[in-house]
């Protein structure tokens, strides 16, 4: 029996663990101690800091891992690449993992490869920001190069906001610099992709629903992307160029994109499956289990066998986080939703009495809803209906 070590023990990793067990693999969850659901889901536990490459390598050796995988979070990607390379396992390289985790290196790789991306500058203080703003056009976005999600990222529409927020970002990052880039205002979208032994098996463009909190935070996704064929072709072209620019191979890929006036720009990417229900987006759309592809490839089995079982008809689907616009305590949960085959998932991770925070990032999610149906419009209407019938009261 092959052993898969999964980096991270939060809810998305539970789905990866379940898929691996369904394929007959022995599963080991690797994480720091905590109240995480992955510990109960896996066959075995290895305690380690997944942001520490040497700790992950040692854990993989200890459990005799045949493969290492993660999904939906960036924390373990660098360690995954390092350990896979050291042990000769199937996975992205250390160099590609490092590049995809560092926005400065990533942007330079994009520019060198001719990938469409926003103009940017490196800034270390107020003086270098002032010089950058002589070149860049407002609005701009200040970004920490080493933080995950939406941390250390601020949209600035005025010079005053840029000078204020660069100090905030420099205080939050572990680096002595950050980047400032032109904020391209257009249609936010994304793409999921998968590359195996140099072959990009698919590029799936998807739509994004966002919530403005310092920057635009994804709170849901949908597929297929409702866009002209020219835009879809541009997405495919830029995604493939970006993957090659970073040197990614043997991994899932998550990309953030912007479309403006028919031109598609790559904002950033990472060598793992996207979060906020994106593995489910891929699974539903293609009619197969995307988590199984990730698990199989990691242990050296051929993921194309799973992808080849996909359905001919693509299934429209949409997802949305359940969130609170204020901090407080969950008073009660009112569930008036009639379950049917359209509901792929409707779940909460809070209960009455729990303290919740006003939503600013994915860590503040209360739950999620994923639906599938005949058309995108039908899916959107179904989500709205469910949100009216499923109420989390906060006081």
Image (spheres, rainbow, N blue to C red):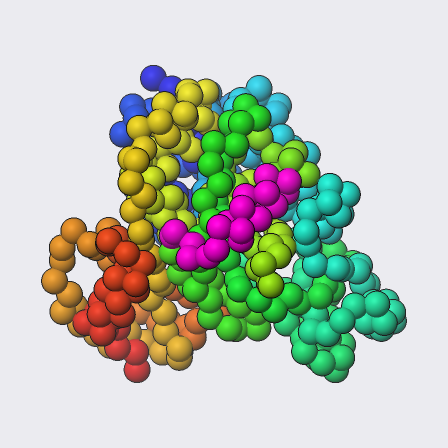
Q: Is residue 74 magenta?
A: no
- Residue 13 at x, y percent in the picture: 39, 43
Q: Position of residue 76 (x, y in %)?
A: 54, 42
Q: Tell me if residue 19 comes above or below residue 220 in the rendering.
A: above
27 and 380: which is toward the camera:
380
Eyeballing the image, is 12 above or below 46? below
Q: Quadrant location of the N terminus?
A: top left
Dominant secondary structure, magenta: helix
Q: Is residue 166 visible?
A: yes
Q: Is residue 301 left or right of residue 119?
A: left
Which quadrant holds the C terminus?
bottom left
Bounds of the magenta segment? 223-242
Where residue 101 sits: x, y (%)?
63, 46
Residue 74 appears anywhere in the view: no
Q: Is residue 380 left or right of residue 226?
A: left
At a point 36% along the width and 23% down the height, the residue shown is 305
Which is more toward the observer, 102 or 114? 114
Specify the quadrant of the image occupied by residue 279: top left
- Figure check: 79 above or below 185: above
146 horizontally vs 16: left or right = right
Q: Is residue 137 above or below residue 147?
A: below
Q: Where residue 245 sits in the image (x, y, percent)?
A: 68, 38
- Comparing 183 with 358, the one in front is 183
Task: Give the residue drawn at x 57%, y 19%.
Answer: 88
Identify the residue at horizontal 52%, vertical 62% (top origin).
Answer: 188
Residue 349 position by quadrant: bottom left
Q: Residue at x 76, y 79 (%)?
A: 159
Q: Nearer the viewer, residue 236 or 276?
A: 236
Q: Quadrant of residue 123?
A: bottom right
Q: In the drawing, does residue 102 fall left or right of residue 249? A: right
């Amino acid at each position: 029996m092959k052993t898969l070590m999964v980096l991270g023990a939060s809810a998305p990793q539970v789905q990866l663990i379940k898929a691996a067990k369904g394929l007959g693999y022995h599963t080991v969850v690797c994480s720091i101690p905590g109240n995480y659901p992955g510990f109960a889901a896996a066959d075995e536990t290895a305690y380690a800091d997944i942001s520490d490459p040497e700790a992950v390598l040692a854990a993989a050796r200890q459990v005799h891992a045949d493969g290492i995988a993660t999904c939906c979070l960036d924390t373990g990607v660098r360690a995954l690449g390092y350990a896979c390379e050291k042990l000769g396992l199937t996975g992205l390289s250390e160099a590609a993992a490092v590049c995809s985790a560092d926005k400065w290196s990533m942007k330079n790789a994009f520019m060198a490869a001719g990938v469409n991306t926003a103009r940017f500058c490196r800034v270390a203080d107020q003086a270098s920001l002032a010089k950058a703003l002589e070149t860049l056009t407002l609005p701009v976005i200040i970004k920490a190069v080493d933080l995950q999600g939406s941390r250390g990222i601020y949209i600035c529409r005025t010079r005053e906001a840029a000078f204020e927020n660069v100090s905030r970002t420099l205080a939050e990052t572990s680096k002595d610099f950050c980047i400032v880039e032109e904020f391209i205002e257009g249609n936010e979208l994304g793409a999921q992709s998968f590359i195996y032994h140099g072959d990009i098996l698919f590029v799936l463009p998807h739509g994004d629903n966002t919530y403005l909190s310092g920057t635009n935070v994804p709170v849901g996704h949908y597929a297929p992307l409702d866009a002209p064929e020219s835009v879809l072709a541009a997405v495919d072209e830029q995604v493939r160029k970006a993957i090659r620019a970073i040197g990614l191979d043997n991994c899932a890929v998550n990309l953030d994109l912007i479309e403006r006036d028919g031109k598609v720009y790559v904002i950033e990417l990472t060598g793992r499956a996207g979060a906020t229900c994106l593995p489910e987006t891929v699974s539903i759309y293609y009619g197969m289990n995307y988590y199984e592809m990730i698990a199989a490839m990691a242990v050296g089995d051929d993921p194309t066998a799973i992808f080849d079982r996909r359905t001919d008809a693509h299934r429209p689907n949409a997802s949305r986080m359940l969130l609170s616009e204020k901090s407080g305590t969950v008073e009660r949960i009112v569930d008036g939703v009639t379950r049917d085959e359209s509901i792929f998932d409707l779940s909460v991770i809070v209960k009455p009495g729990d303290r919740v925070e006003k939503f600013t990032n994915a860590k503040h999610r209360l739950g999620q809803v994923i639906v599938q149906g005949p058309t995108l419009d039908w899916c959107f209407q179904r989500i709205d209906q469910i949100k009216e019938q499923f109420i989390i009261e906060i006081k």
